[in-house]
Image (tube, rainbow, N blue to C red):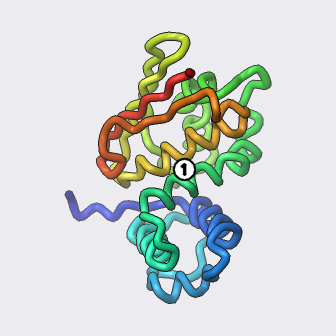
Amino acid sequence: MSNEILKVHGSIFFLLKKYIDKHVTLFSWEMLLTEAKPSEHEFEITRSYPLTDMNAIIDAASKKTGIAPNQLKENFGEFMVPDLFRLYSNYLRPEWKTFDVLVNTEKVMHGAVRNLNSTAEPPVLSVNKVNENLLIIDYYSKRRMGALAVGIIKGIATFYKEQNNIIITPTTNPEDERVQIRVEYI
């Protein structure tokens, strides 16, 4: 890996704090920051921060809760969806459901993220619609946050009340830069 410092947008830290405050209630955000020792203790929504800070916070939460870091990332991804959908509601069509959102995420949603905030760098998604019941999503990000992507997909299915009709399976290691995710209607 290069010496490039990977960054995470401040809005993700804002949502992570919201998730921690709601779901990791035995330990406060401040306690986790004290343990994680991130480069900063205040995260502005418009700036980007080192990925190492986010990973340190998640690792601290994992140690405190006994929940594996990838499971926390997945849970956090699922939690984020309603806030993301409120923020980007103008880009969602009323007739869309889970598959439609996933098929259009890279062009419509990530395009909007990149246009609205030049410092945001969402992962690159390539979505292949195999048939009406199966999508294969190729996720690429040097941040290696495939578990977060799986959680977001689960959150989208939950948002559309399709969580019991869709199976979401990473077919490669969610900690890799490239992760393949199978999304299938049952």
- With respect to residue 178, does 38 lie above or below? below
- Residue in the foreground of this view, choosing between 35 and 166: 166
Quadrant position of residue 89: top right
- With respect to residue 185, does 49 lie above or below? below
Can residue 53 be seen by looking at this rendering?
no
- With respect to residue 104, does 68 lie above or below? below
Quadrant location, the C terminus: top right
User: How many residues crowd around disc 1 within 10 Å: few (fewer than 14), some, or many (20 or more)?
Assistant: few
Judged from the image, the secondary structure of the residue bearing numbered disc 1 is loop
Residue closest to the far right: 94
Residue closest to the far top: 131
Query: Hey, what amino acid is under mark 1?
Result: Ser
Say which residue appears at 63% left-offset and 45% top-offset.
116
Say which residue appears at 36% left-offset and 47% top-offset.
174
- Left or right of 6, for residue 30: right
- Residue in the foreground of this view, choosing between 90 and 130: 130
Say which residue appears at 20% left-offset and 57% top-offset.
1
- With respect to residue 171, does 78 lie above or below? below
Say which residue appears at 61% left-offset and 60% top-offset.
11
Q: Which residue is mark 1?
A: 118
Where residue 2 sits: x, y (%)? 21, 59
- Residue in the foreground of this view, choosing between 46 and 57: 57
Where residue 70 sits: x, y (%)? 42, 57
Where residue 109 sits: x, y (%)? 61, 35
Can residue 101 be seen by looking at this rendering?
yes
Where residue 92 sits: x, y (%)? 72, 30
Query: How many dots with numbers?
Result: 1
